[in-house]
Image (cartoon, rainbow, N blue to C red):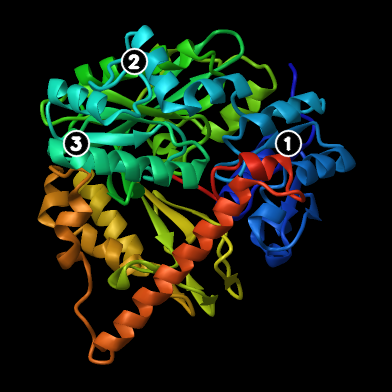
């Protein structure tokens, strides 16, 4: 049976560690790449070989596909795993990997392109009978046409960018008088963020749940789904807590959403692991949102309840092996929850935190899993995503899983860098979350409760300084991302195509 011979992991942090460990279990030698800032990183130490690919800025290292492919050739790797973020959904990089005679451990570039533009993806989904939210059939640039569509489907509506993600280029419009300005603002932000000002109109679902379906597809025509993940605890479209099963999904809804996800994958010729995201309204109607054509950050909770290792499945699919199981073989047991441990200060507008990890205590015990790239002595800077680790628990039911997560969070100690652990603990104490009756507005509604009361040493002036720092950091990242997207004489094709540095959803 065919097997990959050597895998280059084109990423960093916890996902690089996760992929390296799966390769080791499959008996596959590995190659790591790293920036100068990551010289002592855990993924560098775990790989069989490691190569420096440039200075700390991602545009000069982890987003430089030319360098990565050159290292793969030099090291004798026959395949590349992109992880998530960075180049993982860059169709040009996927195609170039194949053109270089290597295997890309992910979907083909054609599938990425098919699902990367939300307007064309929505049209493809409609043709495949996948439920889509009411709205325009294509790009909208005329305020009068936008008004006509909005009035036909009813306010509120959303103006949404066709390209990109991460909440950029989105405006919620509650009445007709707001439409023209919202259209201009969404187009402008989309153009700056993605170099495409294309936007469309879609019905805004009030109090929606964000529920996604994991799919696996091999090269032999076999496609299965592995059930749902609830991702409604999010801030600015960035997920914070995920769980499976969802409190709103029963067996019938799971079957229908799963069938729709499989149809979506088949409609774009999908291969490997992917996730189809839906919004579910209060009446349990579900609508296609987008497809993430890569491994998701929250994939471990699906592994915990199905017993299927998604990264090892990716490796086998990329080696042209069949799935080896059918939809009827997929079973679910128990309840799993994941949280993202991030270097940030939720009590002061989630300003990113920096510093050196002086001391680290990781939680343990039965059914507690940690996917991490963090270690004592690690320097946490501003070059990359703020996520330090993922904490995952599994239990027999939801109540037990929540209790286990609270215990594990209480055992998780990091000194030297501020984290969001206290914020996460407060999430699991809110009546709304405990009841399971939450939606994507949960964080905004409960923000006052979730924030810690000001300490005696925290004055208003200090809080204002923290907010100013956060604004400066966001502006700097935006300028860096726009520089990468805008193009320059010395930039590679991968930099030009990158949506933004380290985008994770």
- Does residue 449 lie above or below 72 as drawn? below
Q: Secondary structure at mark 3?
A: loop
- Name the spot of residue 139 as percent of width and height, x first: 38, 24
Residue at (73%, 62%) from the top-left corner? 55
- Residue located beneath label 1 in the image: 27
* For residue 434, side relative to residue 246 (left or right): left
Q: CA distance from mark 3 to mark 2?
A: 18 Å
Question: Which class describes the residues within 10 Å of circle 2: few (<14), some (14-19), or many (20+)?
Answer: many
Q: What residue sits 38% from the left and 76% below the top?
A: 468
Distance (Cα) linking label 3 and label 1: 43 Å
Residue receiving disc 2: 260
Which residue is found at the position 43% from the left and 62% from the top? 342
User: x, y (%) of residue 380?
Assistant: 56, 70
Disc 1 from disc 2: Cα separation: 35 Å
- Residue shown at the point (66%, 47%) measured from the top left: 63
- Residue 208's disc number: 3
| First of labels 3, 1 by sequence position | 1
Q: Is 316 located above or below residue 435 in the figure?
A: above
Q: Is residue 365 visible?
A: no
Label 2 SS: helix
């Amino acid at each position: 049976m065919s097997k990959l011979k050597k895998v280059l992991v084109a990423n960093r942090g916890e996902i690089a560690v996760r992929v390296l460990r799966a390769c080791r279990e499959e008996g596959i030698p590995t190659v790591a790449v790293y920036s100068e800032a990551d010289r002592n990183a855990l993924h560098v130490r775990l790989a069989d070989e490691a190569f420096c690919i440039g200075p700390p800025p991602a545009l000069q290292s982890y987003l430089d596909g030319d360098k990565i492919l050159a290292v793969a050739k030099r090291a004798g790797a026959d395949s590349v795993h992109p992880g998530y973020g960075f180049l993982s959904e860059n169709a040009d990089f996927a195609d170039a990997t194949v053109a270089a005679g290597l295997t890309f451990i992910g979907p083909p570039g054609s599938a990425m392109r098919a699902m990367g533009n939300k307007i064309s993806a929505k049209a493809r989904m409609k043709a495949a009978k996948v439920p889509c939210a009411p709205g325009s059939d294509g790009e909208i640039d005329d305020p009068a046409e936008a008004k006509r569509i909005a009035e036909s489907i009813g306010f509120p509506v959303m103006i949404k960018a066709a390209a990109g993600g991460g909440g950029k280029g989105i405006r919620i419009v509650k009445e007709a008088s707001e439409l023209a300005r919202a259209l201009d603002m969404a187009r402008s932000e989309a153009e700056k963020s993605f170099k495409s000002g294309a936007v469309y109109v879609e019905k805004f679902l009030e109090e929606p749940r964000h529920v996604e379906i994991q799919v696996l597809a091999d090269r032999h025509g076999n496609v299965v789904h592995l059930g749902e993940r609830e991702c409604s605890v999010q801030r600015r479209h960035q997920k914070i807590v995920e769980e499976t099963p969802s409190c709103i999904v029963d067996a019938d809804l799971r079957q229908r959403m799963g069938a729709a996800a499989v149809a979506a994958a088949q409609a774009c010729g999908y291969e490997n692991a992917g996730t189809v995201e839906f919004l579910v309204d209060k009446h349990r109607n579900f609508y296609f949102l987008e497809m993430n054509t890569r491994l998701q950050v929250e994939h471990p909770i699906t592994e915990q309840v199905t017993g299927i290792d998604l990264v090892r499945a990716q490796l086998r699919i990329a080696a042209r092996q069949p799935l080896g199981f059918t939809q009827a073989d997929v079973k679910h047991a128990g309840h799993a929850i994941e949280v993202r441990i991030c270097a940030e200060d939720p009590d002061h507008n989630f300003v990113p935190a920096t510093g050196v990890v002086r001391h680290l205590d990781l939680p343990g015990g039965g059914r507690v899993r940690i996917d991490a790239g963090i270690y004592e002595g690690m320097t946490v800077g501003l070059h990359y995503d703020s996520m330090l680790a993922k904490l995952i628990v599994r239990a027999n039911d939801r109540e037990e899983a929540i209790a286990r997560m609270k215990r594990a969070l209480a055992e998780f100690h990091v000194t030297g860098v501020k984290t969001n652990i206290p914020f996460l603990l407060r999430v699991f104490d809110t009546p709304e979350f405990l009841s399971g009756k939450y939606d994507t507005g949960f964080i905004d509604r409960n923000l006052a409760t979730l924030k810690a009361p000001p300490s005696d040493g925290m004055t208003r002036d200090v809080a204002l300084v923290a907010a100013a720092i956060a604004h400066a950091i966001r502006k700097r990242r935006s300028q860096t991302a726009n520089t990468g997207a805008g193009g320059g004489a010395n930039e590679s094709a991968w930099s030009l195509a990158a949506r933004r540095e380290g985008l994770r959803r």
